[in-house]
Amino acid sequence: MFSTLLGALPRDPTRDDATDEDRIQGTIADLEGVGLELVSDGEPLDLTTLPDAAMVVAGWRRANAVVAAAGGAATVKQVLPGPYSVSRDMRIAPEAWAVALKETIAALAAAGCSFVEIDEPDALAISVVPSERRRFVDAHRRMTDGIAGVHLSLTLTGGNLDAAGPSTFFDLPYASYAFDLIAGPDNWRLIAAAPGDRGVICGAMSAAPGGDLNREVLVWAAHYAASTSGRGIARVGLANASSFAGLTRDDAIRRLGIVAQAARMAAADPKELAGMLDPRAIRLPPPRRRNAGSRG
């Protein structure tokens, strides 16, 4: 059971004049400080050009060194743009992105990065257009073919993708999948169909300014995902549902703290967990009284 950030963090106005290294150091400290076990540099993805493997590896090493220097226990992941979504924005064929990303993933694995997240925030078309679905699958197959020595995770946000069918995702060689369960509540159908040996990250913390911040909902989501296909709680993570772009930095960090707390609660012994939750979340309503004149 773990907690993580999906996407980028809002900018920190107090660090506008900081160097890249100092800014990333501050972000890592913020994420570790609220208890996330799987962290990133929190920076927006560069969608303007095909990735340069050497530069990406250097960035990951820099973030990883920050954790190591502070004696932290968090794992640093590298987030990369998904070949399908980014090709829609850049008008570059997804196959070209897939080739460049494959080289980058292989370089990250060789450098010691253990967790690479592929972010697909704009894939809703694959649910309704068969040709788009084929483009999505072909790009991901090309990108992941032959990759070894690293945990690959696919993040799917922005809405319901269940109409694309489970095989669209689970026939791909990803070790885990993150689903947006607020904009896409029907994605629970995909989680229920996911093979039990695949990890599931429940994007169940709202990123909306007035969204629900209930930790009990997060704990329920973790345990429900754990119950599907005999998955178990060890293969489940919790995260925000979508981009925090509409929030302040402080609000985003506060919400991630709730995510981290819920993940620790979900991993607790069931007897201990009951005492951590709001009683109203688990208490059954009192039995209805029969009217004095009723029979039976």
Image (spheres, rainbow, N blue to C red):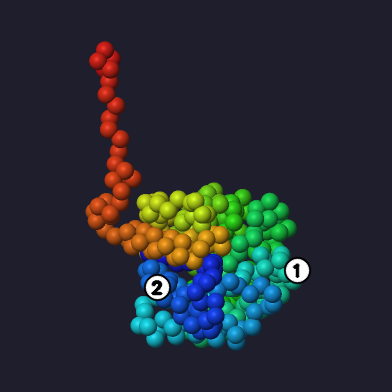
Residue 171, image x, y percentages = 57, 62
Residue 12, image x, y percentages = 51, 71
109 is higher (above) or lower (below) than 86: below
Q: Secondary structure beneath disc 2?
A: helix
Q: Gap in Å between the C-alphas at discs 1 and 2?
A: 37 Å
Q: Is residue 171 visible?
A: no
Mark number, residue 91: 1
Work out which quarter of the rendered image holds the N terminus and state it.
bottom left
Residue nearest the viewer, comparing 169 with 14 = 14
> Is 273 displayed left or right of 107 in the figure?
left
Q: Amino acid at mark 1?
A: Arg
78 is higher (above) or lower (below) than 270: below
Q: Which residue is mark 2?
A: 32
**Disc number lying in front (1 or 2):** 2
Q: Is residue 185 visible?
A: yes
Q: Amino acid at mark 2?
A: Glu
Residue 141, image x, y percentages = 63, 69
